[in-house]
């Protein structure tokens, strides 16, 4: 390897880029703490080269944010993006689409799906016109995923075409783009093909060699309701650095427990440490355990805490700034059946038993119905239902 000449702009530039790429590779491999060290070192070298190469700040920023997100350090990632936008107004204007994709990705990782949608839709449109960092394909895959998850079929269809028609990006982005696109297809079709594609992707050498990427992919499967991945999450998460992996390890390790108190305590800890979407799952699991043991009052308390997490994560979808032309609300037949029983006062488990589906299915349909109707709880359902 050619020796580096400190103080030479080309050598400093190459060194900064190399460190940024190393940071991203380490994060994908499950070594995000080490990756963050490399990204911070790359950022420290930027003042020497930022006048000579236009996109270096943004290139390194992306890798720095990815490392923070891999670690589950949501606030640090948001702070870096906010500081960049405030300190580099010209850069923020030129790279606005890429910055919005990073913000949308951050919100998605936190489980704040509606806010991610509001960020990713305009990001894709901006990148359609100007994409210096080649993030259009990744951004369209993420937007396809959130659109499908929120039940916006028309927008999901358009974004799916954007994803499929775009050129492949960098390898590290392509793997995650493929995973989120496959999950989006499953949310749209519910035919098992998207989930099968995720399972296939999880066994490819490119993914199995990247523990961090694999853990994120398994988390996407779990979000789809595939609990078969939980043992894999438990065995893998302990080998991945960062608070997010530790939180996933806790949730996976206690998922099969019959100790409702342990689940409730873990849920409360997850909530207070910023993993509200994981706390929501722990509360939901605790409510099922309590219901099965006949402790219906405590089960309702767990449901209330789960709904509190839903409220914190969600926003009123139809009030979104970028969705002014939202179509008339349309509930599927299954959503109508579930909502009708929910309005009658049945619990999620009672609805599941009545319709012979899983509790997770009931929860998912209710969540999507809340989003479509712009409500936050069962109490608001009756008055918000379309005529």
Image (tube, rainbow, N blue to C red):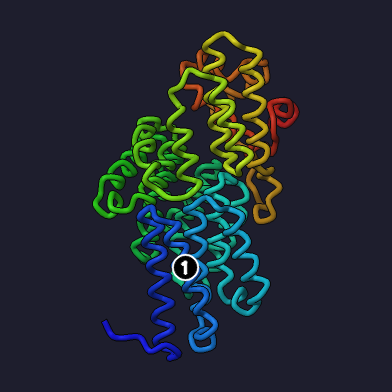
Residue lying furthest left in this view? 205
Picture coordinates of residue 37 (x, y %)?
46, 65
Q: Residues within 10 Å of mark 1 (few under 14, many from 20)?
A: many
Picture coordinates of residue 142 (x, y %)?
48, 53
- Which residue does the image show at 42% across and 60% down from the upper left? 34
Question: Up-down: is 28 above or below 234?
Answer: below
Q: Nearer the viewer, residue 163 or 157?
A: 163
Residue 188 vs residue 114: left or right? left
Q: Nearer the viewer, residue 47 or 158?
A: 47
Residue lying furthest bottom in this view? 8
Label 1 element class = helix
Residue lying furthest right in this view? 383
Quarter of the figure with residue 81? bottom right
- Which residue does the image show at 39% across and 64% down from the upper left? 166
Residue 80 vs residue 193: left or right? right
Question: Up-down: is 3 above or below 373?
Answer: below
């Amino acid at each position: 390897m050619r020796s580096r000449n400190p103080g030479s702009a080309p050598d400093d530039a190459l060194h900064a880029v190399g460190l940024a790429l190393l940071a991203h590779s380490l994060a994908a491999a499950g070594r995000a703490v080490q990756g963050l060290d490399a990204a911070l070192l790359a950022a420290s070298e930027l003042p020497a080269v930022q006048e000579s190469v236009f996109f270096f700040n943004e290139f390194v920023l992306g890798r720095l944010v990815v490392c923070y997100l891999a670690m589950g350090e949501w606030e640090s990632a948001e702070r870096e993006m906010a500081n960049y936008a405030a300190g580099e107004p010209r850069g923020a204007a030129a790279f606005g689409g890429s910055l919005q994709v990073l913000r949308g990705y951050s919100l998605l990782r936190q489980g704040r799906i509606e806010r991610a949608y509001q960020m990713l839709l305009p990001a894709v449109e901006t990148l359609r016109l100007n994409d210096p960092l080649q993030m259009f394909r990744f951004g369209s895959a993420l937007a396809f995923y959130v659109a499908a998850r929120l039940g916006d079929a028309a927008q999901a269809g358009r974004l799916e075409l954007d994803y499929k028609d775009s050129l492949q990006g960098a390898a590290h982005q392509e793997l995650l783009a493929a995973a989120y696109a496959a999950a989006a297809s499953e949310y749209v079709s519910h035919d098992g093909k998207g989930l099968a594609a995720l399972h296939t992707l999880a066994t490819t050498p490119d993914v199995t060699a990247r523990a961090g990427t694999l853990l994120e992919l398994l988390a996407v499967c779990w979000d789809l309701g595939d609990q078969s991945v939980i043992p894999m999450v438990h065995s893998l998460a302990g080998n991945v650095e960062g608070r997010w992996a530790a939180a996933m390890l806790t949730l996976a390790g206690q998922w099969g427990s019959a100790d409702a108190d342990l689940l409730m305590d873990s849920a409360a800890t997850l909530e207070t440490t910023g993993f509200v979407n994981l706390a929501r799952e722990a509360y939901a699991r605790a409510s099922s355990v309590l219901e099965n043991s006949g402790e219906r009052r405590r089960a309702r308390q767990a449901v209330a805490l789960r709904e509190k997490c839903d409220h914190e994560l969600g926003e009123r979808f139809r009030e979104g700034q970028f969705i002014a032309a939202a179509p008339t609300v349309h509930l599927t037949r299954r959503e109508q059946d579930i909502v009708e029983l929910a309005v009658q006062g049945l619990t999620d488990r009672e609805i599941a038993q009545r319709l012979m589906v899983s509790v997770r299915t009931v929860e998912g349909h209710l969540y999507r119905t809340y989003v479509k109707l712009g409500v936050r709880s069962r109490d608001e359902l009756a008055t918000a239902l379309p005529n």
